[in-house]
Amino acid sequence: MRLPSQVALVTGAASGIGLAVARRFAAEGASVMLADASEEAGADAAWQIRADGNHAQFAHLDVSQPDQVTQVVEQTIGTFGDLHILFNGAGILTYGTVLETTVEAWQRLIAVNLTGTFLCSRAVLPHMIARGRGAIINVSSTTGSHDACAHAAAYVSSKGGVTLLTRSMAIDFAKQGIRVNAICPGPTDTPMLRKALTPAELEAFAKTYPMGRLGRSDEIAAAALFLASEDASFVTGEMLHVDGGQTAEV
């Protein structure tokens, strides 16, 4: 096991990449608090992890709400006695140019994808600094960290912000023993992407990239495990692209 006796808080843990990360961290020995706005799916996911013989609990969380974030961090520490790892996986996706994006859609997407990452990180940092160690793993995207794309103005803006927030925190807290990195997934087969695109669009989308397929959530989770573990003890401020070669040819 690569995360023995570790405690991890995973946001966006009810489905997709967040769920895969929570399962992998728990299988590797961590006690995991699954946090998500989807209460039924999140509670069921935590139950399934416990049924597999691992340690997990669920907490309802809207990452855009500061009071909820503080409460869930305190709940995690109170339940498991510590907090070593934060995985900022909560995220939403909307399409549209600047002219097509409503103010409400822009504000909600930024609130979840970027402000949520800021709020969760801000809430866990004092605990991590007091103990002189910790790992924060954010989720950026190939679209937003390396390049932009058409018709996704709010999304790429949010992920570009996550990229530079990651690097900023990595610089600011390196001497306190905190490592801050980001995973930049390429197109990954998740419920969020399947909701946004039709099956035909997904198939055509996947074929445009070197490996000719979508990524899997468990492949992203494997990268998250590396960044959370001692194997990445000298890695901070890194944007780890897990994209099947997408950024290699852009």
Image (cartoon, rainbow, N blue to C red):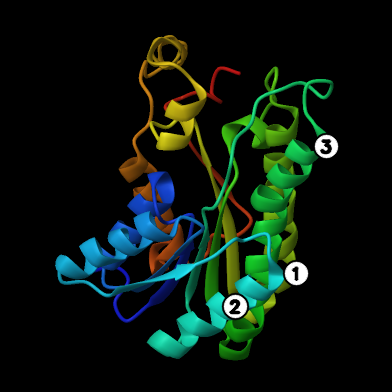
**Residue 243 seen:** no
* Mark 1 neighbour class, 10 Å CA radius: few under 14, some 14 to 19, many 20 or more: few
Q: Which residue is mark 3?
A: 103
Which of these two is toward me, 198 or 244?
Answer: 198
Give the spatial CA distance, label 2 vs label 3.
39 Å
Rendered view: 77 above or below 101: below
Res 30 → quadrant: bottom left
Rendered view: 222 above or below 235: above
Rendered view: 112 above or below 135: above
Q: Which residue is mark 1?
A: 172
**Residue 62 seen:** yes
Tag 1: amino acid: Asp
Whole-percent x, y for residue 7 in the image? 40, 77
* Mark 2 neighbour class, 10 Å CA radius: few under 14, some 14 to 19, many 20 or more: some
Whole-percent x, y for residue 11 in the image? 50, 60
For the C terminus, give its image quadrant. Answer: top right
- Residue 177's label in the rendered image is 2
The residue depicted at 74 percent of the width and 34 percent of the height is: 154
Q: Is residue 5 left or right of residue 130?
A: left
Give the spatial CA distance, label 2 vs label 1.
10 Å
